[in-house]
């Protein structure tokens, strides 16, 4: 396969996102029916959901649900939400710049802290490091957090199997290091980055709420006008404003 | 738990938790009185917060004790403390004001929902302002927008066009919010963080297509929300057909908050290291700001509907804010922030005056304003004074805005922009003067559709309106709060953005 | 004794209190007018205190507060301002007397609003007079514009609306569109808007460069109240107002605030020496000269007396602008004296026009034939005023013309001298013709019968005033006449006391040596 095809096929998920996005937007603008507009809007939003999920995906990663055997000593009842944070805060050690080592030491650290059963404290304890530091090298440090590294590593691994990377400019050196990091803990459990999932759950809720409002409005418009076709609505409004035939009429300006 | 320690979260929590309770109150006075008290509480919290920030500097509050950047951070510096103060202040005035107006314009059965939606909208606006988390901005933006759609649609009792207006607003608003969220997603992809301060650190020096695209999506998304010309098409109808109290509220707050978000993203997230910024200033914000100032203002001159005229004028005024931002200097940013504050005061007062007229005349057509000075003198003078403020006459806040803007324009070497600013003020003179002339010099309609009883608006409306009018005059003389704080806020933002201070 | 600084504050504040009192006595006309007169008397007293204090070499100042850091609302009296303050307050007193006669004689509506707006306007005029910086001046300048708008549109009919529209449109457009940017620009260059003897901007000449001319142009046209052509249309349009408004505001307070500002900007912002050295004021000198002649030419064919006077005012105001733009000390002095002389003279003319309107309901010059015979006092005063405006001794108007010509000679502009001469001749034509017609021509209907009708019968002309007592034209109300007498006397007095005035104003040109 030549470079072009690879370039396109490698990013099939983004193409899906873009196609859906354009379809959705086109529907919103081109359709006169209010409900169809809402449908278009939903397609548009769905593309964004997919986009976010794409961001979070790590090759070979499993769903970000806590697997008990990885962190023996962890408590099952810590549950899903905490797991998300647990995964996210793996980020912190990576920021110290040492790929593989960091990953393993991190793991040890997490074990300890899980043993102490104070996840929140752990997060907070780890916290100040990434914010305060200034980037010293272009590699992992300026690269995204741990969760993100997983993804980059994912890309790197894929590319390694095919041709030299034609990836994001930002990756650069980071890819290799990330690949190391990822492989270092490939022996453990790889999770898909949960944060985008959480975000998109929120976005879905927002989207559903929006759809509800939109549909409710469509219903009310149907009640008030007897139609939900945009051009008919405009015609009715202009009749209300200017009278039949578009001739300005002073009375009846108020609908 | 110490309440003071939790102060930063109160502006969001108070209306969010207490707001929905309004829904279960019996219709009538109860929801209104309740909402009024809640809005005052919120205002008190915001005022304390402003004092606190002014005193002690930036406040960072980790929500649920999850430390940033992983947890959601509420980060309050002078810029957003000022906007918080403004938004909650307007809410604290509009809510008591709304009673009579809502009684007339909204179906009585809906009043509990109305006040609930108003408080939720307030929550969203305050949340957008206060939060230091990019995704959180989106969530709050949608909270405020969704409730605003509902509020606008409630105007359907008087005019069914409110429904289509709300629907259009809904479509545009959702597209805007989704664009914004795409942008945030791209930034997340590039940096792996959502915390605004952290984003800034990680974006430093980064320039890639991902970041560029994210920036573009965010600017367009926010541009839709803030009614940047030519993305303003939802504004005129939404403002015109919403219940008058809602018009007053959203005109004074919603777009201002969006401007704040734009400022926050441009200066706190991207900063001057970001290559795209200069081009955005020169080729997007500056021309669009100028175009808005002129085109929207000119359209305003020819409106027969006063609310719609004010809506177009809002689009024009937003042009000033964009212009201020686009200078990329401390003075320009100060001018923008000052104008955000001042414009909220004048537009709030103007829409309130229109609400009073609607209450008595049942219409916001220019015809209803004929001879108003003989029928409702108190309202008339409130309208005229805030109208003068809109033009930018000395002793009013509008003048202070113009002064800051002009100074910024000349200091930034954009002297032609200075003349364009005053030229567009003259267009404001045209449309305000037109209404003023009708009010002062025409004879009132004695009978027919636009006849007005010779009775001024009730005190519950006049008092909040005149508080705003006096604020228009007071802040026109004492600029310590507006100009002083805005200058400090702008310096802090500029410092963060790495521009010259 | 009130300190001069306090007097400045009270000059601005008292009329506002008076305004409140007027509002409170809405239903009691006598008390209401009493409040006006009382305020006016007190105001004159304050103005005299300030005037004397300045005359003793002091410069009382009053600092209110800073609006924006570096931009205070502050007052400082200097000779020019003190003189303008005295003129404005003194003539307000005269005008108040006149207004009472006029408004009652005419049975006007909305008299309370009228007096209230008047009080606010005079407060703003005093603010302009004593302003110590451009920012303060601009604020009161705008207040003056807005407070006079209800006065201009007092009648509220279609004509008043149109006039008011032009009035407000031109004044606001120039002040916001040109003056405000000019002030901000000045502030951006000099970081101050303070009036400084010798010129604020002269210290920043290198930063200014070629902008100086642009800036001066912005000021010259931005101060629309100075009615430099082509920003004059507001003035003729303002004539839809009741005559006391035209008399006071559009012969004294408003227009003089305009030319006063121009003069003050020339002297204290640019500096006369600076302008002369750089020579950037020359184009505006020619514009002012052109304005003088053009306005006079237009005035000649105006039949409406007030319109004619309005164009005469446009012309006369440009004398002051001309004086400022000559950039010589004599020019500045001429301009300053012109402010005083023209105020008194033109006010006399306007009040006479009003008196004619009240007494005879005549507003067209062509209808005034023979009226002088029934209203000798009014037209006598008109004659005096006209002579003063033309610049003939022994009236006040002669000195400024003389000084201006001296100034033009100093500047080596002979053409300007010729222009001034032509203008005076034009003045003679359009002003003196009015009293001459009134005195020398017979009344319509009273002229000797012509050939055809001569033989209709014996010489029994219709008795005069045959239409009944209603049409009998008498002299104007006493209130009006008293006021007219005061100003007409003023023109005479000012002629003889011009030397003290010259000395008083001389600090204005202390820095600028005669070239």
Image: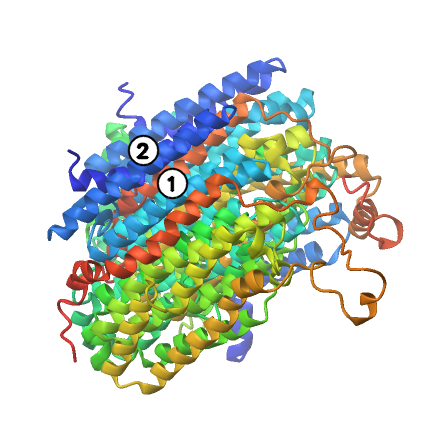
Taking the spot 48% from the left edge, 25% from the top edge, the residue there is B463
Residue C465 visible here: yes
- Residue appearing at x 23%, y 66% in the figure: C267
* SS class, disc 1: helix
In the displayed structure, does residue C106 sit left or right of residue C14? right
Residue with the mark numbered 2: A72
Q: Badges 2 and 1: C-beta atoms under 8 Å apart?
A: no
Nearest the viewer among C288 and A226 is: C288
Classify residue B75 by image quadrant. Answer: top left
Percent of width and height locating residue C262: 32, 64
Q: Marks 2 and 1, Cα distance to the nearest angstrom?
A: 49 Å
Q: Residue furthest left?
A: C57
* Residue extending farthest right: A245
User: Residue B444 location in percent, x, y?
Assistant: 69, 36
**Circle 1: is it few (<14), some (14-19), or many (20+) Cα within 10 Å?**
many
Where's the N terminus of chain B, which quadrant? Answer: top left
Q: Residue C94: x, y in percent?
A: 39, 44
Residue occupied by mark 1: B83
SS at badge 2: loop
Taking depth in this image into account, of B344 and B277 the one nearest to the observer is B344
Disc number lying in front (2 or 1): 1
Chain ID of residue with mark 1: B
Q: Please give left or right for residue A79 compared with residue A89 in the image.
A: right
Residue C186, x across and y down, in percent? 27, 65
Determine whether, in the image, residue A85 is placed left or right of residue C479.
left
Color scheme of the displayed model: rainbow
Quadrant where the C terminus of chain B lies? bottom left
């Amino acid at each position: 396969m030549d470079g072009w095809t690879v370039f396109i096929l490698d990013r099939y998920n983004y193409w899906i996102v873009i196609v859906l996005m354009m379809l959705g937007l086109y529907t919103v603008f081109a359709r006169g029916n209010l409900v169809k507009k809402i449908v278009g809007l939903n397609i548009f939003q769905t593309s964004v959901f997919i986009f976010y999920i794409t961001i979070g995906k790590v090759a070979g990663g499993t769903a970000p649900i806590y697997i008990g055997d990885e962190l023996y000593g962890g408590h099952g009842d810590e549950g899903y939400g905490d797991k998300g944070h647990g995964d996210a805060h793996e980020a912190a050690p990576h920021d110290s710049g040492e790929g593989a080592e960091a990953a393993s030491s991190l793991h040890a650290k997490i074990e300890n802290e899980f043993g102490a059963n104070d996840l929140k404290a752990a997060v907070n304890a780890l916290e100040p490091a990434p914010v305060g530091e200034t980037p010293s090298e272009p590699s992992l440090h300026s690269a995204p957090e741990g969760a993100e590294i997983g993804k980059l590593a994912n890309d790197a691994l894929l590319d390694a199997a095919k041709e030299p990377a034609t990836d994001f400019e930002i990756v650069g050196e980071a890819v290799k290091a990330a690949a190391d990091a990822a492989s270092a803990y490939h022996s453990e459990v790889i999770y898909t980055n949960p944060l985008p999932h959480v975000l998109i759950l929120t976005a879905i809720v927002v989207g559903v709420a929006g759809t509800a409002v939109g549909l409710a409005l469509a219903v009310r418009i149907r009640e008030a006008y007897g139609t939900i076709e945009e051009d008919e609505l405009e015609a009715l409004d202009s009749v209300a404003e200017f009278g039949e035939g578009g001739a300005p009429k002073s009375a009846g300006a108020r609908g | 738990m110490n309440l003071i320690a939790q102060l930063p979260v109160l502006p969001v929590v108070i209306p969010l938790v207490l707001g929905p309770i309004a829904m279960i109150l019996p219709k009538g006075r109860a929801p209104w009185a309740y909402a009024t008290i809640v809005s005052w509480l919120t205002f008190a919290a915001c005022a304390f917060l402003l004092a606190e920030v002014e005193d002690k500097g930036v406040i960072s509050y980790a929500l649920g004790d999850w430390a940033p950047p992983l947890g959601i951070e509420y980060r309050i510096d002078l810029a957003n403390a000022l906007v918080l103060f403004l938004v909650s202040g307007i809410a604290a005035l509009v809510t008591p004001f709304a009673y009579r107006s809502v009684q007339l314009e909204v179906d009585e059965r809906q009043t509990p929902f109305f006040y609930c939606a108003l408080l939720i909208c307030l929550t969203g606006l305050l949340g957008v302002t206060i939060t230091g988390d990019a995704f959180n901005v989106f969530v709050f933006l949608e909270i405020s927008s969704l409730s605003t759609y509902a509020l606008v649609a409630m105007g359907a009792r008087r005019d069914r066009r409110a429904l289509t207006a709300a629907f259009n607003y809904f479509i545009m608003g959702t597209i805007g919010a989704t664009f914004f969220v795409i942008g945030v997603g791209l930034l997340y992809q590039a940096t792996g963080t959502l915390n605004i301060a952290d984003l800034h650190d990680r974006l430093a020096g980064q320039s890639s297509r991902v970041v560029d695209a994210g920036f573009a999506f965010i600017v367009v998304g926010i541009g839709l929300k803030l009614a940047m010309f030519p993305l303003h098409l939802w504004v005129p109808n939404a403002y015109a057909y919403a219940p008058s109290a809602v018009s007053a509220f959203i005109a004074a707050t919603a777009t201002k908050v969006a401007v704040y978000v734009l400022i926050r993203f441009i200066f706190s997230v991207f900063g001057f290291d970001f290559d795209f910024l200069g081009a955005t200033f020169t080729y997007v914000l500056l021309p669009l700001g100028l175009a808005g100032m002129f085109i929207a203002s000119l359209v305003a001159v020819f409106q027969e509907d006063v609310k719609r005229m004010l809506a177009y004028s809002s689009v024009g005024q937003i042009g000033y804010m964009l212009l201020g931002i686009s200078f990329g200097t401390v003075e320009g940013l100060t001018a923008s922030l000052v104008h955000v504050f001042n414009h909220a005061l004048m537009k709030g007062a103007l829409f309130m005056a229109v609400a009073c007229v609607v209450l008595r005349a049942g219409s916001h057509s220019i015809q209803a304003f004929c001879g108003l000075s003989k029928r409702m003198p108190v309202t008339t003078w409130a309208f005229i004074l805030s109208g003068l403020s809109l033009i930018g006459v000395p002793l009013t806040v509008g003048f202070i805005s113009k002064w800051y803007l002009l100074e910024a324009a000349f200091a930034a070497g954009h002297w032609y922009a200075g003349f364009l600013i005053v030229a567009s003020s003259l267009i404001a003179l045209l449309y305000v003067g037109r209404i003023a002339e009708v009010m002062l010099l025409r004879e009132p309609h004695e009978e027919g559709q636009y006849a007005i009883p010779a009775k001024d608006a009730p005190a519950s409306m006049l008092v909040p309106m005149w508080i705003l009018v006096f604020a228009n005059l007071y802040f026109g003389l004492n600029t310590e709060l507006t100009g002083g704080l805005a200058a400090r806020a702008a310096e802090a933002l500029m410092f963060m953005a790495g521009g010259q201070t | 004794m009130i300190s001069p600084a306090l007097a400045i504050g009270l000059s601005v504040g008292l009329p506002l209190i008076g305004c409140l009192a007027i509002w409170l006595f809405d239903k009691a006309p006598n008390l209401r007018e009493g409040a006006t007169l009382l305020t006016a008397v007190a105001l004159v007293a304050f103005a005299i205190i300030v005037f004397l204090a300045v005359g003793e070499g002091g410069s009382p100042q009053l600092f209110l507060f800073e609006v924006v850091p570096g931009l205070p609302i502050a007052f400082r009296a200097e000779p020019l301002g003190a003189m303008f303050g005295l003129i404005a307050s003194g003539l307000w007193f005269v005008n108040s007397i006149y207004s009472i006669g006029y408004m009652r004689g005419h049975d006007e509506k909305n008299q309370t609003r009228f007096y209230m707006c008047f009080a606010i306007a005079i407060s703003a005029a005093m603010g302009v007079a004593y302003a110590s910086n451009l920012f303060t001046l601009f604020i009161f300048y705008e207040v003056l514009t807005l407070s006079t708008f209800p006065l201009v549109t007092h009648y509220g009919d279609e004509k008043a609306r149109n006039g008011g529209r032009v009035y407000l449109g031109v004044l606001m457009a120039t002040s916001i569109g040109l003056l405000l940017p000019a002030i901000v620009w000045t502030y951006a260059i000099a970081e101050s808007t303070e009036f400084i003897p010798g010129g604020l901007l002269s210290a920043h000449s290198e930063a200014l460069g070629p902008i100086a001319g642009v800036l001066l142009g912005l000021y010259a046209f931005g101060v629309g109240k100075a009615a430099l052509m082509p920003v004059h249309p507001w003035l003729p349009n303002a004539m839809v107002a009741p005559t006391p408004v035209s008399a006071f505001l559009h012969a004294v307070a408003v227009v003089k605030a305009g030319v006063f500002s121009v003069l003050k900007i020339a002297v204290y912002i640019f500096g006369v020496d600076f302008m002369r050295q750089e020579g950037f004021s020359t184009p505006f000198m020619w514009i002012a000269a052109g304005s003088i002649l053009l306005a006079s030419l237009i005035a000649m064919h105006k039949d409406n007396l007030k319109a004619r006077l309005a164009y005469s005012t446009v012309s006369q105001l440009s004398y002051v602008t001309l004086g400022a733009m000559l950039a010589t000390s004599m020019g500045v002095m001429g301009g300053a004296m012109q402010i005083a002389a023209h105020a008194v003279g033109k006010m006399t003319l306007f009040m006479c026009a009003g008196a004619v309107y009240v007494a005879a309901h005549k507003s067209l010059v062509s209808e005034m034939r023979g009226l002088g015979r029934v209203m000798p006092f009014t037209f006598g005063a008109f004659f005096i005023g006209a002579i003063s405006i033309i610049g003939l001794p022994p009236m006040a108007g002669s000195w400024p013309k003389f000084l201006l010509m001296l100034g033009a000679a100093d500047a080596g502009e002979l053409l300007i001298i010729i222009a001034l001469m032509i203008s005076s001749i034009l003045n003679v034509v359009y002003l003196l013709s009015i009293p001459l017609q009134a005195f020398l021509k017979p009344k319509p209907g009273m002229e000797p019968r012509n050939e055809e009708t001569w033989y209709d019968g014996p010489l029994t002309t219709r008795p005069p005033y045959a239409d009944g007592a209603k049409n009998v034209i008498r002299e104007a109300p006493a209130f009006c006449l008293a006021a007219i007498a005061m100003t007409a006397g003023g023109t005479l007095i000012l002629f003889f006391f011009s030397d003290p005035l010259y000395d008083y104003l001389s600090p204005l040109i202390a820095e600028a040596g005669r070239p």
